[in-house]
Amino acid sequence: MANKIARLNAREQDPTLRAQNFEEVSYGFTADEARLEASRCLQCKHRPCVGACPVSIQIPDFIAEVRDGEFTKAADTIARDSLLPSVCGRVCPQESQCEGSCVLGIKGLPVNIGKLERFVGDTALAENSFKPVKAAPNGRKVAIIGSGPAGLACAADLAVKGYGVKMFEALHKPGGVLVYGIPEFRLPKDKIVAREIAKLSALGVEIETDVVVGRTITIDSLLDSTEQGGEGFSAVFVGSGAGLPYFMGIGGENLNGVVSANEFLTRANLMKAYDGGHDTPIFVGKRTVVVGGGNVAMDAVRTAKRLGSDAFIVYRRSEAELPARVEEVHHAKEEGIEFRMLTNPVEILGDEAGRVRAVRCVKMELGEPDASGRRSPVEVAGSEFEIECEAVIMALGTSPNPLIASTTPGLETNRRGGLIATEGGATSRAGVFAGGDAVTGAATVILAMGAGRKAAVAIDEYVAGLERFFWFE
């Protein structure tokens, strides 16, 4: 029976070797491995994995096609709901979504859906089998602000519907967090990200980089008609992400050697500081402390390790409360990362030259659950101690940049700076839609993609409503 076959895991680089390079950790499945793992799927009638996928990929269908060796058909099945299978197969938290809902996981181990999706995506890229199918042009244009996961998903769905879609990206490369936030050893940029994004161009999507909306152009100018001197877009989708980092507000955060994970990873990934052939400056010192416990913290600490530093995670709760993916924590430990749990920084100490020399911390213990359901950390009296280091990376999360909201009249935000939007992405400003981290704050790639897809549906309905209104007029 299918459920008697042991779950297959993809082969990986040796931890000792990979901690010294930026090559991808996982090798992925071979064709034979993919077919064997796909044969474990029970093909459930109620398909709980589909309901747990934020973009509703028809998972049993593509897995059945992999099982039968129909890899191109599997790619076409995924492409109906996602143009980024090679990305999502690598970075999605499958354990809490599709795999977390797999029936096989009730009494055993779920189907390795993530690695199967990655295999299908990588095979399609290698064979260049993507064949864009889209409706005839409908004469309407939509602007997408930000080329991260939310913007990419929204752009793809609108392009398929026949819209003229133009994306505006503030940085010099498209991809958002896929290119500046996630390290090369988890998500190769040229091999995977650039080639996945190229599918948008095949759909006719135009991407303009180095455009800072709110400075270079405004949302008003995008929506204004050409007669008014504007760009004449029917609607705008804001998928600008959450790039404004949080700090703790403790003493010493202005010392040389303290950076946000956002800046650190941008230098390492987008600006290729890890590559000796590039001139981008980056500093880790002999010992680096990374404050935080999420996926970004794992990315930062593992990057610091690869740059030659002894790297530490400092987190104020226990390991059971770590928000990072279990796989990422496991990989970090294999690579020699030290975890200082139930530890909270209270001050960063500097030397006479204004450089970091240590972090003063206190021990914590867990009290009652807070609003998130996690037990609240409580300081242990008289437990102060120091961790010597030369660099501190703050990985405490990010909030949306306020620039777009502050330069767009009538666009409302919540107390965290996120744009207020309905489930379909409609904002307080007519014709302006938003989704992903720009609304929720920092979340996952796949949740942002799901928001982008919902917004595409709402934008299509909005534009159709405009046309009906003007026809009656």
Image (cartoon, rainbow, N blue to C red):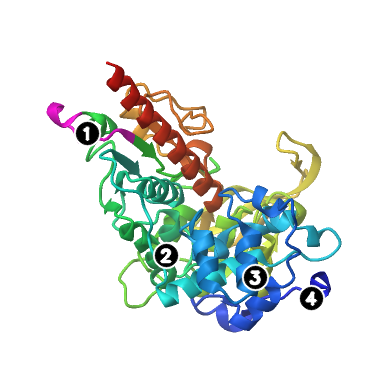
Q: Which residues are magenta?
A: 225-235
- Mark number displayed over residue 6: 4
Q: The residue tagged with tag 1: helix, strand or loop?
A: loop
Three-letter code, disc 4:
Ala
Residue that label 2 marks: 193
- Mark number displayed over residue 331: 3
Along the polypeptide, which appears first: circle 1 or circle 3?
A: 1
Along the polypeptide, which appears first: circle 3 or circle 2?
A: 2
The nearer-to-camera label among 2 and 4 is: 4
Q: Is residue 42 visible?
A: yes
| In contact (CB < 8 Å): disc 1 and disc 2 | no
| Residue pictured at 76% horizontal, 46% vertical | 382
Along the polypeptide, which appears first: circle 1 or circle 2?
A: 2
Q: Is residue 397 visible?
A: no
Dot 2, crowdedness within 10 Å: few (<14), some or many (≥20)? Answer: some
Q: Nearer the viewer, residue 287 or 444?
A: 444
Residue that label 1 marks: 232
Q: How much space separates mark 3 and mark 2, taking CA atoms?
A: 22 Å
The nearer-to-camera label among 3 and 2 is: 2
Queried whether the magenta region covers residue 193, the answer comes back as: no
**Quarter containing the N terminus:** bottom right
Q: Quadrant of residue 467?
A: top left
Q: Is residue 438 above or below residue 358?
A: above
Three-letter code, disc 3:
His
Q: How much space separates mark 2 and mark 4, taking CA atoms?
A: 31 Å
| In contact (CB < 8 Å): disc 3 and disc 2 | no
Q: Is residue 325 above or below residue 422?
A: below
Q: The residue tagged with tag 4: helix, strand or loop?
A: loop
| Residue pictured at 37% horizontal, 30% vertical | 464
Three-letter code, disc 2:
Val
